[in-house]
């Protein structure tokens, strides 16, 4: 039995539906085109790297600790 391969890139629609449901797909594409979200383009579709998606999930689940002043 072969192990299931992990995805390395996600289509914009998957990222929008699963991580940013309140942001439109078109808005994410605009952010990609402005280079605010890393991606690769194959034909007319953009794909977002897994490391970026993982980074956003980690930030949402584990926000950075607040700095305390003395």
Image (cartoon, rainbow, N blue to C red):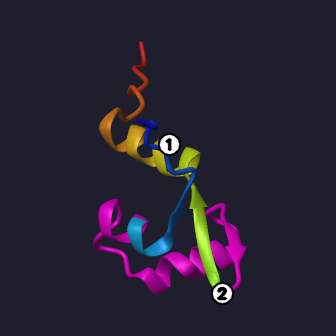
Mark found first going from the N terminus, 2 or 1: 2
Q: Which mark is residue 68?
A: none
Task: Tell me the SS state at disc 1.
Answer: helix
Number of numbered labels in the structure image? 2
Decide: marks 2, 1 in contact (CB < 8 A)?
no
Q: Residue reaching furthest front? A: 1
Query: Circle 1 is placed at which residue position?
Result: 55
Q: Position of residue 24 (x, y in %)?
A: 38, 81
- The residue range painted magenta reads 15-43
**Looking at the image, can residue 31 be seen?**
yes
Task: Tell me the SS state at disc 2.
Answer: loop
Q: Is residue 38 above or below residue 53?
A: below
Figure quadrant of the N terminus? top left
Q: Residues within 10 Å of mark 1 (few under 14, many from 20)?
A: few
Query: Circle 2 is placed at which residue position?
Result: 44
Tell me the mark number nearer the camera, choosing from 2 and 1: 2
Figure quadrant of the C terminus? top left
Q: Position of residue 35 (x, y in %)?
A: 70, 68
Q: Position of residue 65 (x, y in %)?
A: 39, 26
Q: Residues within 10 Å of mark 2 (few under 14, many from 20)?
A: few
């Amino acid at each position: 039995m072969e192990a299931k391969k992990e995805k390395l890139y996600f289509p914009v629609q998957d990222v929008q539906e699963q991580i940013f449901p309140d942001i439109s797909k078109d808005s994410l594409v605009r952010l990609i085109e402005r280079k605010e979200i890393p991606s690769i383009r194959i034909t007319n579709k953009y794909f977002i790297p897994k490391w970026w998606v993982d980074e956003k999930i980690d930030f949402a689940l584990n926000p950075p600790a607040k700095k305390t002043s003395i």
